[in-house]
Amino acid sequence: MVITLGFEGSANKIGVGIIRDGKVLANVRKTYVTPPGFGFLPKETAEHHREKILGILKEALEVSKVEIKDIDVICYTKGPGMAPPLLTVAIAARTIAQVWNKPILGVNHCIGHIEMGRLITKAKNPTVLYVSGGNTQVIAYSNRKYRIFGETIDIAVGNCLDRFARIIKISNDPSPGYNIEQLAKKGTKYYPLPYSVKGMDISFSGILSEIEKKALPHKANKNRKKKVEDEELPSHEDLCFSLQETIFAMLVEITERAMAHCGSHEVLIVGGVGCNERLQEMMGIMCKERNAKLFATDERFCIDNGIMIAHAGWEMFTTGTRMKWDEATITQRYRTDDVEVTWDVASDE
Amino acid sequence: MSEIAIIKQGAEAKLYKGVWNGNECLVKERFVKNYRLPELDKTLTKSRIKAEQKTIKRCEDQGIKVPKLFHVDFNERKVYMEYFLKAITAKEYIFRLEKSSDNNALDLLCSKIGSIVGKFHVNNIIHGDLTTSNMLINFNDDGYDVIFIDFGLSSYSAGHEDKGVDLYVLERSLISTHSSLPELFEKMLISYKETNTLSTETIKRFEEVRARGRKRTMVG
C-alpha cells in the first residue's frame, strides 16, 4: 500500500490531492479568479497560492482521514508552468517533506494529466489530446516515452479562448472557457474564421486576430469613415459559437490524423479545455465514425488538480524513481517527451 | 466505374479499390465529417479536393512522381486515382530496415525523400502533411521510387515561413514516429539542400519556427 500526496500550482489553480493505490482519498482545489478583461499574472497568482496552500493541505488531510505517518512521498509539480506559482508550491512541498521527514518527488505536469486520465477512464493505450491554457498537444506512447505527434506552433487553445474572453470582457468565474461554452450554446450564425492545420500541428494566433476584428471593428480599423452600428455587430453568442466550432474541428482533425498515423483506436482528452462538452461531443462523433473509443473526464480531474500529481508521482515512486534534494527544483520548460516512462503503459511493439 | 472493397479509413477519407476505364484504380472518398458544421465541412472538403488536384498537376509538370489523377467528382466527394498495389508506406519500410539494421538502405531512403522535398520547395509546393505515412515505397526492377501522396493540405507558396513550417512538420513526425532513429531528418536535409537551391533562407526560417515551439512557455 503506497499513499502519495501531490501539490499542483503551475497556473491559476492551487490543489492538493491524496491517493492510495489508485483510490482518490482527497482532491481539494482553489482557483485564482481575476476580474473580466484581465488575465492572471505570475506575481499575484503566486501570492494567491501562498495564501491558500496550507488551508488546502489541512482540508485534504481531514477529508482523506490519512495520518501523516502513513504518507509515503510528497509530490509536487516540477514544471512546466509559470515560475512564481511553481516556486511557491515547490517551496511549500519541500518544507512539508522536511518537517514530516518524507522523500520528495517532482512531477511533470503534462504526465500528471495523462496518467490521471488513464486512471479515471481505464483507457489502455490511447492517443491523447492534451488541451489547456498553456498546452495543445497530440500525444501517443511508444518506446518508453509519451511522444508528441502534433502541437500548436503558436499559442495554446486555452490561451486563445481566454484571450477572446478578455476581448469581449466576459467573466472569468468559474473560468473564461466555461462562460464561452455557455454563450456558444446560444449561438446560431457561423462566421467563417481561418482554419489552420499543418499536418498534425495547429495554429491559433491568426484565428484570434481575425475574431478580434469581428468583435471590435472600431479598434481594428480606426480610420473607417462609416461607424459600425452596434446592432450590426456580431453577437457574442454567435462569435463564441463560431470560435468553438472552428478550433474544435481543428483539434478533432489533428487527433484523427494522429490516430490514423499510429493505428490507434482510443482517444483520451485531458487538460482544462477537455471538459468542454461540445469538444467531447465532436470527438465522440469522430470516434464513432472510425470505430474508436473516446475517454474523457469531468472538471474534477480535467482541470489542474493535486490528484494528478499525486497519482503520476505514485506511478514513478512505485517503479523506483527517487529524487535527491538538490534535484527538487522547478523548471518553466519541461516537455512531455523529456520524461522517461518507468511504469507500465502498454506492451511495446 | 465501380467500387469493390474498402482498403482503409485514413484520417480524411475512406479508400476503396475501384475501376476506372477498365483499369484498377484507387477511389478516395472524403466522406462527410459529422462532427463539424455542415458549412465548414463542405468548404474544407472542396478546398482539399481542389488542392490535391492542383498540386498533383504541378508535381507532374515538374517531373515529380505522384499518383495519376483520373477523375474528380465533387458531388460524391470522390477522387479516382492511380493505385500502387504493391507499394508500402515509408513508415513500414523504415520499421523493416530498423529491424534488419540496414543503415545503407536507410541512408538511401533519406536521400531520396530529402531530394523530393527539396524539389517541392524549390517549386513553391508546400505539402502540408509530411509524414512517413504519406510517402509510398513503390518497388520496381531498379529498386524503388518514393511517391508522395495526400495533397489535401497542400498549398502553393514562395514564402520561406510556409516551407519552414513544412520542414518542421516533417521533423516532428520523424522524431515521434521513428524515435529510435534520431538521425533521419538530418540525413534528409543533406539531399534537401542539393535540390532546393534556395534552402539557406528556408532552413533559417525553419530553425526560427522550431525555436518558437521550444521557447513557448508551457503553462499547464
Image (spheres, coloured by chain):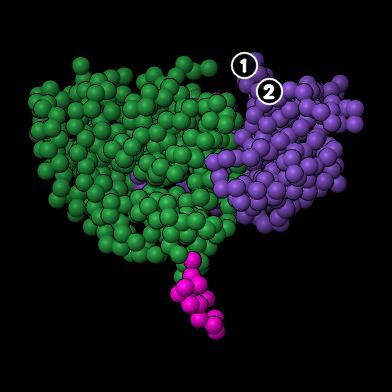
Q: Colour of chain A?
A: green
From the top left corner, tell me how far across and down residue A343 is, in percent.
Answer: 36, 21
Q: In this view of the protein, which residue sits in the foreground, A148 or B42?
A: B42
**Would residue A334 be seen by someone viewing this image from the given angle?**
no
A347 above or below B94?
Answer: above
**Would residue A94 be seen by someone viewing this image from the given angle?**
yes
First in sequence, mark 1 or 2: give its number.
2
Q: In the rendered structure, the residue with mark 1 lies on which chain?
A: B
Q: Residues within 10 Å of mark 2 (few under 14, many from 20)?
A: some
Q: Chain letter for purple?
A: B
- Residue at image x 26%, y 33%? A307
Q: In this view of the protein, which residue sits in the foreground, A159 or B104?
A: A159
Residue at far bottom of view: A225
| A263 left or right, relative to A81 | right
Amino acid type at circle 2 is Tyr
The secondary structure making up most of the magenta span is loop
Tag 2's secondary structure?
A: helix
Quarter of the image where the C terminus of chain B is located:
top left
Marking on residue B93: 2
Marking on residue B66: none
| A298 left or right, relative to B204 | left
Q: Is residue A224 magenta?
A: yes
Q: In the rendered structure, the residue with mark 2 lies on which chain?
A: B
What residue is disc 1 on?
B99
- Residue at image x 80%, y 42%? B72
Quadrant of res A2 = top left
Residues shaded magenta: A217-234
A345 above or below B147?
Answer: above
From the top left corner, tell me how far across and down residue A45 is, in percent.
Answer: 24, 54
